[in-house]
Image (tube, helix red, strand yellow):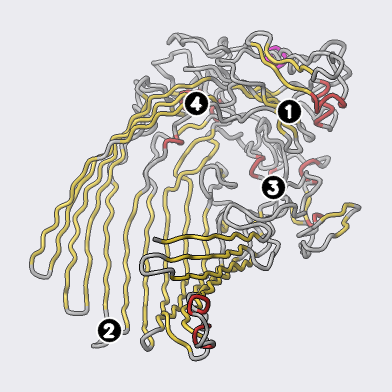
Amino acid sequence: MKTFSTALLNDFRFTAQRNNNLQAVPAKKLPTPPELGIGITPDELVGPTIVSFSSGMIAGFSNQGPTRLIDNTFTTGDTLTWLKGRHTFKTGASLTPYQDNTVYDFYINGRFYFRDTGGISGPYSKNDRADFLLGLADEFLQYPAAPSNIRSKWIAAFFQDEWKVTRNLVLSLGMRYEYSSPKYDTQGRSFTWELGQQSKVFPNAPRGILFPGDTNAPKGSNFADKNDWGPRFGFAWSPGNSVKTSIRGGFGVFYDILKAEDNLQFNGQAPFFAFADLAFNPLTDNPAAEVLNMTKPFIAAGQPNPFPSRPTPKDINFAAAGYLPLGGGGVYSVDPNLRTPYVYQYNLDIQREFGSNILFDIAYSGTSSHKLTGLVDSNPFIPGTTSRIFNLPSGNPANAFSYLDTFGNVGLANYNSLQVELRGRPREVRGLGNISYQFSYTYSKSIDTTSGFRANNTRVPYFDRKHFRAVSDYDLPQFISLSGTWELPFQKAWGGGPSRLTRGWTIQPIFNYRSGEPIDVGAGLSRSRTAPGPSGAGDQTLVRANLVAPITFFDPHVSQTLNGKKGNYFFDPAAFSRAEFTAAGFDPVNNPSQRTYGNLGRNAFRGPTRANFDVSIAKITKIDESRKLEFRADMFNAFNYALFRNPTTSITSGTFGQISSTGSSTDSQPRVIQLALRLIF
């Protein structure tokens, strides 16, 4: 067994060789430590193998690259307008061919996982860093250099009639048609899952996978959806003879375009290219010989090494080539019957003008979304067994298919909102100067079953696809904004003062407040998905923690000591537990009453609210008829509020329940002051 001291870890740099693969090399100032060998043969050597730990620490480059991408989009279209009487007719069409030419290097040099909780293997020592020193990886992923040549066409046409029915009533009626051809690879590098179906293109493939050219298989990612008709209706009405009030409303059906992400990774998978998702066997005793999890991972897992990728003959034996099990981590396929997602949009708006300066607006806006794409495991464990659905057909090996993450029309969503706005146009206020303002308030709720690919919640359970219907990952029920412009009246207060000093001063404050973001607490179970798990279906990554006590919240400004740990807690971790899932006697395979996704539910509570105040002070000085000098002082987060981000929600983390960061991509963090001077000429 090759081992080395933890004191050397921070001074290691990794170098890779194509066949000798990966070894640890110390900095020159240290004595040479023993070698840590990593035995892989990647399609393309672009960097070190990634090493990741339960704590979140990762050594190595990004798993997303390097990726070479060339996109070509060509667009042509035209619109015709015809005015006749009270009608304004419009019609038009457009055509957009699309090309995607990519070499996608995803985990091309592999990734070893070291987990405190372990995978199928354990855990070994229950310490991820100790396992690393011993070379005891829990899981290994490796994928190919994957070129693609994806093609698609988008066609749209519309007709609209804007009809002025009366002096104060206008109707808008229309219809739109869209068609987006399914994306296909010019080399036919795609596949689809069809339970029990035998491919004729690859006759030695296990039953359940089909390729372009097979009966019941689409040419590309999915069969065409040619039924995307979108009616439109809208109106604008000003009741009575007054022009102070207007009422507007509308309804329409709108279609999405299936994204390239849905089938981007088809061509990176078997049988077109090699791939591997290895789980290593447990240790039952102290090993008498070197453990090969890292030095010879394919031998350790009992799998042939399919790398580097080679051209695939049609009669290839999938098992002998090391292509089984099909599926697993990083493999995304598309439901062949995928339909275009669509949304109903509707709104009603009432505006009323008071006097000559104040405008009040109240509106309702809503959407109802259908056939949204999300991921579902097409190959779950059959409840009550340790067998997956696709592995049961006669002739299939027991390990023919792993889990099969499939893009399908599994998502539903709806959004409803009340929107109120009060706007004051600029006007002189005695003693205060010229003032304008705008107040906005939105009260809303967004609910869905999945919040989209790459979101926190992107998968749904196979047997109960609405089980996690809850507020969306991005739901913010309340938002308040108040802004204005105040032109200071120095020239009136000091009429005899120099105009260059007293004129041109303005203050522009902006205040906003919003609700906290949803918090989702998972059970922190193994991500290897090699066992049925608490639900019995093999989707343990969907399992939430159990709520075992009322949630106690704390002010994160104040440090707390809970269970011997000190930190800026937002909630008490003791309210949550995962003990049930690892307790003696917990056997959801054989005991249906124990099958569970946890009792907490998805996005069950919210993080801290946010309030922020920005202000700008400006002075414009007129130099002459053609030149002005503007001075600005901008203060972001002027009162230096702590804009807390959500606390740590990983129940296995040592900082679970604690807030350790502030700000975001849209919020300033501490107070920021910037000064600017501009000459306008």
Label of residue 104 in the image:
4
Camera-near label (4 vs 1) is: 4
- Mark 3 is on which residue type? Gly
Along the polypeptide, which appears first: circle 2 or circle 4? 4
Along the polypeptide, which appears first: circle 1 or circle 2? 1
Where on the picture, by quarter, is residue 463? Answer: top right
Q: Are marks 4 and 1 in contact (CB under 8 Å)?
A: no
Is residue 300 on the magenta stretch?
Answer: yes
Q: Is residue 632 above or below residue 52?
A: below
For disc 4, the neighbor class at 10 Å (few under 14, some 14 to 19, many from 20) is: many
- Mark 2 is on which residue type? Val
- Mark 4 is on which residue type? Tyr
Q: What range of the chain is rendered magenta?
A: 298-302
Report helix, strand or loop for mark 4: strand
Residue 571 at x, y percent in the picture: 77, 59
Q: CA distance from mark 4 to mark 3?
A: 31 Å
Q: CA distance from mark 4 to mark 1?
A: 29 Å
Left or right: where does residue 524 sit relative to residue 352?
right
Camera-near label (2 vs 3) is: 2
Report helix, strand or loop for mark 2: loop
Q: Is residue 516 above or below residue 44?
A: below
